[in-house]
Amino acid sequence: MPTSCVIGLLWGDEGKGKIIDLFAAEADWVVRYAGGHNAGHTLVRDGERLVLHLVPSAILRPGVRNVIGNGVVVDPFHLRSEVLGLRERGVDVQLGQNLLVSEAAHVILPVHKALDAMAEERRGAAKIGTTGRGIGPAYADRASRCGVRVGDLLRPESLDASLQRLKSEKDALLEAWGGDPIDADALRRDLLEVGEFLAPAIADTGHLLREAHRSGARVLCEGAQGVLLDVDHGTYPFVTSSSASTGGVAGGTGLPPTALTQVRGVVKAYATRVGSGPFPTELRCDVAHRLREAGREYGSTTGRPRRVGWFDAVAVRYSAQLAGATEVVLTNLDVLSGFRPLQVCVAYDLGGDPERRSENFPAFELDRVRPVFREFQGFDGDLSSVREYSDLPAAARAYVEGLEELIGVPIRTVSVGPGRDQVIAR
């Protein structure tokens, strides 16, 4: 059976949570493979809005096993709160049954949050716009081999060694930056306590996933953020700290690279971005305000207003090719109703110079490009109840088909609202 992936094709916030929930109906396992609780996947259940940060987006699907993979950095205190909060809202979260956590995943500690905030403050005007949740420092400690892993929370002696190693490296930096040293004893006590709560869920998930794949189970890998936030291939340095593209699937799950055979790329019918960094098609006029309000474009994790702009076919084509997208899911088409005309970026003037026009996505100087737009006729009407592609307005169909041609990947699914059923299969 195919192992598939759902991944965002721009800077995140494309509506992946709903799409993962949708395709989880075809899955036995759903596994998060990168990121941390800086991700925010929104689901709508019976009109109720649920925002997930660490728990995978198939938690509402009975019979599906949800896995937080080894490539995720886990704040155990946040995870405990998220599990308890979901249970209070009637979601059946059973640790060790429908929710598992890799013992090899690295742990986000209070010191990581402190260092995240200090580093961002020291950047001044060059701030990256992090969520301040300690994601980057936790990944940095993983790379420098001084991190704490989830499995340490079940092994007091191993935890002691990890905390002493971490303290010896961080206290000098904290002192230099005006912070407090790590209280290893208090931290040890808190981690062992939260570890006791999470213990039923902590497992060698890589082994479980390989066995599931070998036996023919259907595995769906859940991307966090988006391809253009990938640490290697995104708009560096304004990126996340993990491999957010499909390149992170094998390393972040323990599945072999050959397992992945289907990639669904998710992208909005327009573009959004949260935080700092280049955004070639960004709008800064009244249309931006209208589009933000129509699409309710506020971060599900931070609540920050998202930057909005027209669809960028150059960027989406790049990310779709990089991720190996086999099909595309277009979300928020309904939001564009009433906007006339619609603009789509089809090329960049490098450095603003028409003589240096390119249809390729550059690794440098993206903040200096000028977008070249192609105009599409707008459309009107409420699309939220449309379920057949042929029932969409002709101009809406022309827009979808125009994007498909520009991306070079078939658009198989169109979303016209936040509800699980508000989708059109082509």
Image (spheres, grey):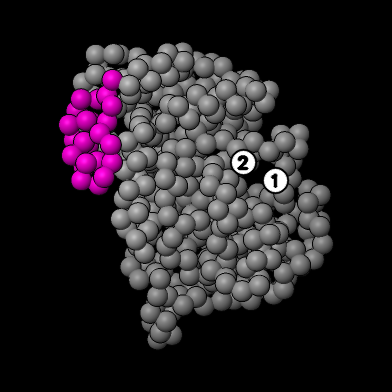
Q: How many marks?
A: 2
Position in image of residue 378 (x %, y %):
73, 70
The tag earlier along the polypeptide, 1 or 2, is 2
Mark 1 in CB contact with mark 2 (< 8 angstroms): yes
* 32 relative position to 190: left or right: right
Q: Quadrant of residue 134?
A: top left
Residue segment shown in magenta? 163-185
Frontmost residue, 271 versus 330: 271
Dot 1, crowdedness within 10 Å: few (<14), some or many (≥20)? many
SS state under label 2: strand
Position in image of residue 101 (x %, y %):
44, 23
Compared with 39, 130 (above or below) is below
Query: Can residue 234 be seen here?
Result: no
Which residue is at 42% across, 75% downward?
369
Compared with 407, 109 (above or below) is above
Type of amino acid under label 2? Thr
SS state under label 1: loop
Position in image of residue 228 (x %, y %):
43, 55
Position in image of residue 194 (x %, y %):
43, 19
Residue, disc 1? 418
Rendered image: mark on residue 42: 2
Which residue is at 57% across, 72% downward?
284
Frontmost residue, 53 versus 166: 166
